[in-house]
Image (spheres, helix red, strand yellow):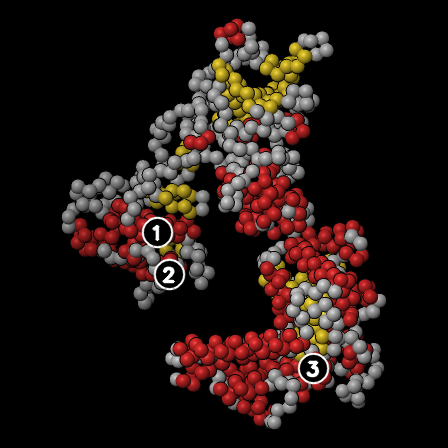
Amino acid sequence: MSRSNPRHHRSPGHSEPPLPIPSYAPPPYNPPRAQYYTSAETAQKFNRLNHVTFLSARIDHPQDAVLEYPETTADTSKLAHIFKIDPNAFRNPTHNIQYSFQVTGGSENLKCQLLQVQDNDGFPVPAVCYKMRGDCCGVKLCNFSSNTHSFPSHTFVDLESTQSQPSPPLPFSAKREVFEKTLALFCSVKVDGCHADAEGTPSNTITNDITPGEESELVNIDLLESTLVERLARGFDHGESSGITGRHLTPDYDDELDAEGEVQLVSVLGRRLESHTFAVPDLMKDRDISYSLIFMSSTYNIFKLFWREIPQSSMTLSLKLHDLEHWHRDDAGFLRPGRLTLKVDCNSLIETFIPYDLHTYPYVVLVTSRPHTHPPPRRSKTPPVHTDIVRTLLIEQDWRLADATPRRLSLNKAFISRLKSLLNWELLSEPVLSDLHPSLGNQQKVNYIIKRTKELRFTAGTDWAGARLLHSDHAQRLSPEDQYLRFADELKISSGESFRFAICMFPAQSRLLSRARWITCDTSYKRVKLYKEFGLEGWDERTHRSISYCRVFMTSESAEAHRLLFHQISRIVTQDTGTPLQFAYIHGQGIEVITADEGKGQALGLGLFLQDICRDNMTFDTPEPTRRLSELLPYDHLARILRLCIVHFQRNIHKIEGKLQPDTIAAMYSLASSQPLRDIDGTLDLIRRGGRVAQNWLYDKEVSAPFALPALYQPLSRIPLERWLAARSTTNGIEQTHHNYNIDGINLTLLGGIMHGYQYDARAISGQDLSLSTLILPTYNPSNHLSRAQTALRRQARTSQKRSASQQQNPEDPTLRSPARKRVAK
């Protein structure tokens, strides 16, 4: 076999399917200690690896053993680790090792005498292997380190003792905590500069006018620090070394400094910084002002205190800023981040012998030599078998993988149940991924595994391209009755704007929509990231169920987008039923009333759609017999079919009650009526006289959304009174449907949102079919007009009783009064 065979060099990468996993996750493996060859075994050359290498000891490991810290020798002698492997699921044992090894060479076609089988004549035949050699990379130290550290060497690691012992904590004090926070802020500004310069000045500079007539100039924070360091180099008294240049300060130097005008210089620089306050005024609130305003103070002792507390080169401060672990004061007195650039070499080496014919020789030999001259590394590397277990569990999630996160996995009962089975878990508490391997306690690592598994499972991604691929796949693979994602395309509207929308509905939902008379529609914004979810819903009196007719994920709420959307829904209904959407005032049958909120684009788009389908209809309009349907404008059509949700209407008034008089509020509420008011014009005039807020509110109803008043006040509408009263007055049904959707998850990917909707609507259709075929209803309580009226009245009574009881117990509690009542009480 060729050396280029990837199976001899590595385990499967994240771009390849995971290998088969064992029935149970490998437990933490503490290997036995090395067994040294006896003198008799050595004399018979049982310890011969090949014609040039002889071993001093060996360890045999069972199949599926995950050895993370292979034992090595204390000298140049050789120790062999022999692993039994599964040839059908080969994972290179060297990838389980926590040490970092650099491959330095390899050889082909080497015979390994430790691995032998007998031929037909009974003679031993050694395995022909590929050899790979690697040297331990050692450790890296901070560039501020003296590079004279000597670490104890080791040859064996007990897995139970590899948990990193935390370094002794520094003595805690409030002063140190405040200093660390302040220093962290300074270091952050030193790295990133000022982020909030509204004038467009470069982020690493700060400007401010100093005095009238004085020229404004740019101040670089590094230059400012250099100025301070230069002065601090001579800013310490006799007996107190600065640690910078070795110069000293006389006891009366502060006075001399003031006389020389150096304090004034620093004060000028401080005034230039003062207006910006490093663009982080909120962060300054819990920092020490004496430190935070160091560049703005004229008290020189603050400089000494601040600079003396910044750690020397031999000290560290635990500040985690991006990839910068520690900050130090260099020999010149400047703050600098530590870098892992100093390398401490390790002479330990490893050699791996992998047979070409793994089925005949199902073993791998790993040879170690020389001790490690550094502490054992943390268990931060995830062995391939544990990675494959996680990837297999993720792939088993199927489409739910599209929205997988570490938190959602921890709440996924199917995932946790599978993990418990693999771990043979018996504790009351549920397992987490770190119980599989400690390295999986790092959520960024888990996120990386999830991301790469998604790339393997969803080749087109989980957003728009993935939805388009899903649409094509469903069209080819599913029967017409099971197809759900019916349309997914990107269209351009007259303004040149392009928008995307994906329509999801089963053919069974199309048939229900074609029979519907009163429907509600609404848009949700939480379900899918970057997409709005538009839905149509109605009530099925046969099964006493709320039925979702369709859901649409779209990127635009414009009127033109909704016009195209309604046209496409009508085409799908035509495809499924043979008849397009019908409306009672146009066709004499079909949808009578649509209840919606005050979405302007949604309403106008519906009106434009109705105008399009009546363009060639020369029938005279029933409410206005002198006009033909083809002559009606979009808002004329809306007056014949649209009704606004009372709950949304009242909620919007409630938001502004505190700014209005009670009579104005009452006039607003009275507009939502099915009966004529005594003086509608007087009511509108009363609202107009209610102030700027009331005027704006009425302007929105009369001008910005001219469909609103006819959709609230039936005498202005063209909908017959019987249909008005029969239709729904709220969109509570579609709101409840959105709530039920959101229980499955919010901020989903587009692919995940579509598939969650698929499952939800499939369950709803199945339940409806069950009710019709077996007469088994969803609940024992009948959901008819009587029960709904009783429930509504009882709910109102309970609410009123609770409010009255609370007001009697706390008559002066202002929280129990509406904003308008609070205003009147004042």
Cα distance, mark 3 to mark 2? 57 Å
Task: From the image, tell me which residue sits under label 2.
Answer: 281
Task: From the image, tell me which residue sits under label 1.
Answer: 181
Viewer-side label of 2, 1: 1
* Res. 405 visible in picture: no
The percent coordinates of residue 580 (x first, y second) are 81, 70
Task: From the image, tell me which residue sits under label 3.
Answer: 724
Q: Residue at x 62, y 26 (%)?
A: 85
Mark 1 lies on a secondary structure that is helix
> Looking at numbered disc 3 in the image, what kind of residue is underneath it?
Trp
| Crowd tier of the residue under label 2, counting other residues whose Cα lies within 10 Å: few below 14, some 14–19, many 20 or above | few
Marker disc for residue 171 = none
Cα distance, mark 3 to mark 1? 64 Å
Q: Residue furthest front?
A: 780
The quadrant of the picture occupied by the N terminus is top right
Q: Earlier in the sequence, mark 3 or mark 1?
A: 1
Depth check, front residue: 707 or 591: 591
Q: Is residue 98 above or below residue 403?
A: above
Q: Earlier in the sequence, mark 2 or mark 1?
A: 1
Q: Is residue 219 above or below residue 523?
A: above
Q: Earlier in the sequence, mark 3 or mark 2?
A: 2
| Crowd tier of the residue under label 1, counting other residues whose Cα lies within 10 Å: few below 14, some 14–19, many 20 or above | some
